Image (cartoon, rainbow, N blue to C red):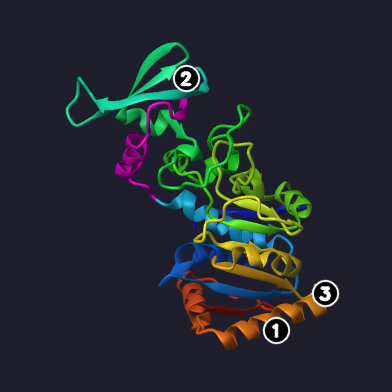
Amino acid sequence: MFIRNLQILNKQKTNYLPDWVVFAFELGSFLYDHGIKYRKPINILLSLPSEKYFSLLIAMGIADKTFSVNKQMRSIKKQVMSLKKGSRIIYQDEDASRKVSVLSVEPSPVFDNEMILWIKDKNMRRAVPEKQWIDRLILLDEESDEIKRSRKVSEKKELGLEGSAILSELYSQAQLSKVSFYPGDYFYLVGNTSQINDQMNEDIFIYNSVKGNIKDFLYMDDKNSYTNGKLFSSQLKKKQVEIAMDVPVIYSDVNSYIKQSRYFSTNPNVIVLSRTDNESRIHEVIEEMKRKLLQEEYNVLTHELIDFLISSNTKIPKGIELFVWR
């Protein structure tokens, strides 16, 4: 896990990551690996002294897995080969990055066993050899065959992940280039959007003297060509977007779960409860969990999470209570 190499920046002083931050990261990793099995979603209930930053750090753990996964070139080739005439993608060269239209994908007339992507670049027909795809192309998420969770693309988007200094320090150029081929939703975060956005913009991390914030890792808006999740307001009155059933949901507080859980009833989820929350609301959630567990067949899997944490040399911090079931 690359993000375990980060340090905390506190009043211009650097410190090693506290146990509770590492725990949150690894919880995200666990969700990514074990979200759905046997067609059943996993459920995790957490009780914490304070929920500040916690849901965002879980999402960072999921994001780190997507940045770290070694997508093979044959998988990237499959993505490009699936593009249809007229598909819009981003082409990058030494001069600039710009949107172009796909014309065709054909065998190379020069080299055996190599493909050529033909694009319309302004008024010019341009050939992009297969060996350049990883460096020259960025797929937009509405063109991704693997992840069909699209959103509209703005002309003002930042392109790819290379603009983040701290990501460029943590991950290799090849990793960041590969990840640009797989935009989509790997988590849903539900909470107070104003508070979450404020926390995301704080410079709280440092690595190799480069400062960074949570927003460097989470791409939930339309400002970048790459996306890895969606942010939902706890005050949302109506489901306005299509929900993918296999995407983990992170409820940042008790209010988020009470108001929005009906929209994500089949998703893997983490419910973050702070012991500073309203006691009656916490009691309401606990009683609801008891009813569900009495009425349905389930398996308690708390031990699986504990074994996972032990295998990654992760401590469960004092003051954290958890319960896991499927």
Which type of secondary structure does the marked residue at label 1 adopt? helix
Q: CA distance from mark 2 to mark 1?
A: 60 Å
Along the viewing direction, whichever of 152 and 16 lies nearer the viewer: 152
Which residue matches tag 3? Answer: 278
Amino acid type of the residue that numbered disc 3 sits on in the rendered structure = Asn
Which of the two discs, 3 and 2, labels the residue nearer the N terminus? 2
Give the mark, 2 or 1, whose residue is nearer the N terminus: 2
Secondary structure found at label 3: loop
Label annotation for residue 79: none
Nearest the viewer among 9 and 53 is: 53
**Amino acid at circle 1:** Glu
Residue 191 in the image: x percent, y percent? 72, 59
> Residue 85 occupies which quadrant of the picture?
top left
Circle 2 residue: 94
Left or right: residue 251 compared with residue 312? right
Spatial distance from mark 3 to mark 2, Cα to Cα?
A: 56 Å
Image coordinates of residue 109 in percent, x first then y, are: 20, 20
The magenta segment? 70-93
Question: Which amino acid is tagged 2?
Answer: Glu
- Circle 1 is placed at which residue position? 287
Residue occupying the point 59% across, 62% down: 249
Q: Magenta includes 92?
A: yes
Residue in front for this viewpoint, 214 or 324: 324
For marks 2 and 1, give the one nearer the viewer: 1
Mark 2 vs 1: CB contact within 8 A: no
Q: State which tag comes first along the sequence, 3 or 1.
A: 3
Task: Between residue 246 and residue 224, name the one nearer to us.
Answer: 246
What is the distance, in whole Å, between disc 3 and disc 1 at their CAs?
A: 14 Å
Percent x, y of residue 59: 59, 57
